[in-house]
Image: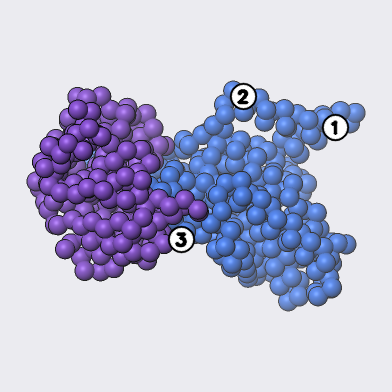
Amino acid sequence: MTSISNIKKQTSKIKIILLVILFYIVLQLLMSAQIINPYWQQIICYAGVMTISALGLNLIYGFTGQFSLGHAAFFGIGAYTSAFIIKSANFSNPLLLIIGLIAGCILAGIIALLIGLPILRLRSDYLAIATLGFGIIVKVLFDNADAVFPVLGGSRGMVGIPQLTTFTWVLVIVILAVLILRNLINSAPGRALVSVREDEIASEAVGVNTTKYKTLGFVIGSMFAGIAGALYAHLYAFLHPQNFDFLKSIDVLLIVVLGGMASISGTLIAAVVWVLILEGLRVVLPEAVLDWRLVIYPLLLILIMIFKPTGIFGGKEFKFLHYGDKNE
Amino acid sequence: MWLKIENLSVSYGMIKALNNISFELKQGEIVTLIGANGAGKTTVLNTISGLIKPNQGTIIFNQKNILNFAAHKIAGLGIAHVPEGRKPFPNLSVYENLRLGAYLSNDKDFITQGLSKVFKSFPRLHERIKQPAGTLSGGELQMLAMARGLVSQPNLLMLDEPSMGLSPILVNEIFNIIKDINSSGTSILLVEQNANMALNIASRAYVLETGKITLEGNACDLLNDPRVKSAYLGE
């Protein structure tokens, strides 16, 4: 590699960092000046939360090729874990949110490992049904959780969760998630993950331990969902089992497919667009046709599938998400 | 004996695919298994590379019984399997496919050496290095599959029907490359329907019929054997 292209790479890296910082400062200023009101602040944070969760599912489905319909369950596990810890300990300092985030992330990861080892032996449709079943079990557990831990509220919902999630927290975790995913995918283990999606027999034949990599992708992806769930819990301060049912898994799946399988850029854009469209239409549309926004969105989806079945980005990436020795 | 298969039996549910077969391969040899469709040739290779678990038997490689090894462990012993139907990673570039061939190695020099050897044998792949594997032609795919097996510089290369679906000129080209690979020190286990070509480059051969080995011997003897001639060479 020549030094000129090295310098170019360095300057573009600095540019991206500066852009992100600028983006942060501008939004932060707009928020503290109340130009972006608290309602929209919450929506922007929610877009970030969905981005993190969808990046996790893209790792599982887009990159590793394992069709999971239980993503919302891991999101919920992260949410309830963090809410339980922070509420019980009565933390009110936003910095202490880190404890809840880590706990939610790790518990989601452990449960993904335990559930993943037996069910990742299944292929495509069978795996989808197994993860679907898992999601339903988890939702039923949430519904009845108050029998063991009254603080979780069961089917009445959990209230009074400290509202610690800030825009800063969300942005930091989004950036971390993007960086972790980018570095993972461009490494040798990342190539192994993708080879499992491409052809399991061939990847076994070249020496990839396919069970290990399927599990690795599933666990890391679920950890993303767990940490996103933890942010979600402290964003809305209220949790209800209904927020983690099967339809919520479908929402994340739609973001991944819409943005493009195996595309980090696509997921970033689709998650933000998805949240902003659903909420934005609420503001733009007149009262009488408000319910139609739930028609416009699926319609958009159908149109994209007809005209661009690979999703908006379909396997492509923004330049800054590329790196490494793609073609030495 | 370097690779020794003894009393190997495999079944798929109720169906017996291999019935008590035994054969062996010395280091540096090309050994071929020939036989008709459904004889069990592919099953033999899949069992050696650990993709299928047999009912009984032993597989000795380098004085180790590898019968119960997982597939990825067997690849680590230096046995490269070029599977039936080539099985490329279609959305990955030629380069990424080859890098995955050397997946088990962390040694950069070793990988670079493997890649340059492979590009010497298959210059066409070098021209297509950035192209997604799914866009290659049938012949190029066969080259890619073989190259992917060779990047790891294996001791034993197992080829499953490399001539399948290729024009006669390409088949010749592929078989010449197989000979070259062998003369540079890699032992080869070749499974083929194209008995004529296979027997011409192999030193020894086994004939497989519905899961049993019915004939074995030096390749040139089998080439002149009347039974082989009538059944497989169309004479």
* Of pointers 3 and 2, the one earlier in the residue sequence: 3
At horizontal 32% and vertical 29% (from top left) the residue drawn is B165
Q: Which residue is mark 3?
A: A212
Q: Closest to the observer: B120 or A253?
A: B120
Kindly give the residue lying farthest to the right in the view shown: A288
Kind of residue indicated by mark 3: Lys
Position of B140 relative to A7 (above/below): above
Q: Which chain is blue?
A: A
At horizontal 32% and vertical 50% (from top left) the residue drawn is B212
Which chain letter goes with mark 3?
A
Q: Are marks 2 and 1 in contact (CB under 8 Å)?
A: no
Which of the 4 image quarters holds residue B5? Answer: bottom left
Q: Which chain is purple?
A: B
Which chain letter goes with mark 2?
A
Q: Which residue is mark 2?
A: A306
At horizontal 65% and vertical 37% (from top left) the residue drawn is A273
Position of A36 relative to A177 (above/below): above
Can residue B28 be spotted in the picture? Answer: yes
Q: Mark 2: which secondary structure?
A: helix
- Taking the image as shown, residue B62 lies to the left or right of residue A168, namely left
Q: Closest to the observer: A174 or B166?
A: B166
Of discs 3 and 2, which sits in the foreground? Answer: 3
